[in-house]
Image (spheres, helix red, strand yellow):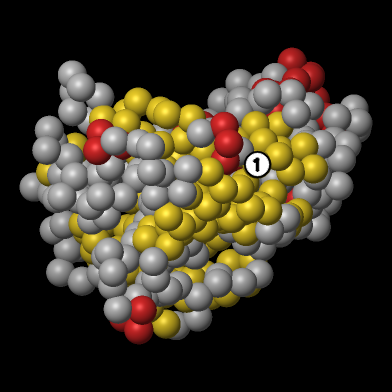
Amino acid sequence: MKQISDPAKQITENLEYMIQNTEVPELNLGEGIVKQMNSKKTELNQRHRMKNKRMKRVAAVSGIAAALGLGVFGSGFVSPVMASALSQVPLIGNIFQQYGDPGLQASVANGLYQPVQAKDSHNDMTLESTGYIYDGTRISVALKRDGQADAKLLGESMENGDRDLSGKGILKDIHIYINGEKYFNGGYTMKDGDTRDTLILEFNDSLPVAPLNADPDKILRPEPLGDSFDLKLEATLTGSDQPYVLTFPVKKNTESLVLKPESVQSHDGFRFTLDKLELTPITTRLTMTGSGELASLGDEYKLPVEDLYAGKHLFGFEIYDENSNRLEELPGNNMNFIEGQYVFDYNFTPFKEKPKSITIKPYVLKKDKSSGKFSEKEYISELEFNVDVK
């Protein structure tokens, strides 16, 4: 799970780019960087304003270089002390560091954040992408809005789960294009960023949701994203008469560990096949298929008639390393039932370091009698998988 690029070099390059293109506020740095920055800040105040940009770059990069000289970067991971210090630097502590999941936060500390310049302006508003993170499994894109808007970029959530789109400047719709072709990826997720004008867009090439017993020829399957591609986002904001188009190249800059154990576990009329585990510094991806039904479980374990997969079980998984450290499941995962099989392509947070072994614990959700929701977990130990990592 090592990175292709040198983390220290990547952080420095990213920092230089962001300093050149960002107004720098007062820095609240970790103790290990403060001394280096203070002397540079004094120099800045004594120079002519025409030289401010160049000196801000020298100051910040020198401070980071001094910190790097402490030897905190080792096998592609950053020490907790250094990660904490870096996260306090406004230019590095970006939207992913502050509001991303553990994998995205670690990617910033490890220099995997890729800044970009992609923006479009009209109707007194500007939409831009400030950067992305991509590990070959999922891509996360930072979006930022400027201009005359009177609502949060993602809009306000209503009690029924919909979004209130009545204001100006709300992201109403977005279309994704890969290498010029409209990309069907089965859905995407968006979450609020650090301000009302930012959000994180995320998607991958997981299998789409298909209706039960759908015609195989009519099931749309996303193509693998690959190691590099041109991404175009076509976003519609409320109050604008035309979409905002952002285009920029995307490149994977991590290596991954792919395990294909092809293990099988059977119990009570059900059969699970573990097809693949993919480990990156940003994501853990689990791919499994299943067939049959758990004969001994009652109707309270089956989805109701109004559900897309009526009568089927609602499966979930927990993933642990040899020290019982549990990964967090990422949002946007959906169980699929395609061509007579359960199909699972789920994303989880990454392991903090390469595990020696991995345990996968499947469970079925049971309907809670009081709430009527499927929330109680029934673990099925007979269908657990244990995978040695070499």
Q: How many marks?
A: 1
Which quadrant of the view contains residue 37? top right
* In the displayed structure image, the side of residue 211 where residue 130 appears, left or right: right
Which quadrant of the view contains residue 84? top right
* In the displayed structure image, the side of residue 210 where residue 129 appears, left or right: right
User: Helix or strand or loop: what does disc 1 sit on?
Assistant: strand
Q: Nearer the viewer, residue 212 or 189?
A: 212
What residue do we see at 70% from left, 28% from top?
A: 83
For label 1, count other residues whose C-alpha is less than 10 Å away and answer few (under 14), some (14-19) or many (20+). Answer: some
User: Mark 1: which amino acid?
Assistant: Phe
What residue do we see at 42% from left, 82% from top?
A: 181
Q: Nearer the viewer, residue 122 or 237?
A: 237
Q: Kindly identify which residue carries mark 1.
A: 385
What residue do we see at 88% from left, 37% from top?
A: 74
x then y, percent, for residue 246: 41, 68
* In the displayed structure image, the side of residue 228 where residue 75 appears, left or right: right
Q: Nearer the viewer, residue 211 or 124?
A: 211
Residue 179 drawn above or below residue 184: below
Which quadrant of the view contains residue 232? bottom left
Q: Which residue in the rendered view is the most extreme toward the left?
A: 166
What residue do we see at 86% from left, 47% from top?
A: 390
Residue 3 drawn above or below residue 236: above
Evaluate whether residue 16 shows in this view.
no
x then y, percent, for residue 213: 28, 69
x then y, percent, for residue 279: 69, 49
x then y, percent, for residue 356: 82, 36
Evaluate whether residue 299 shows in this view.
yes
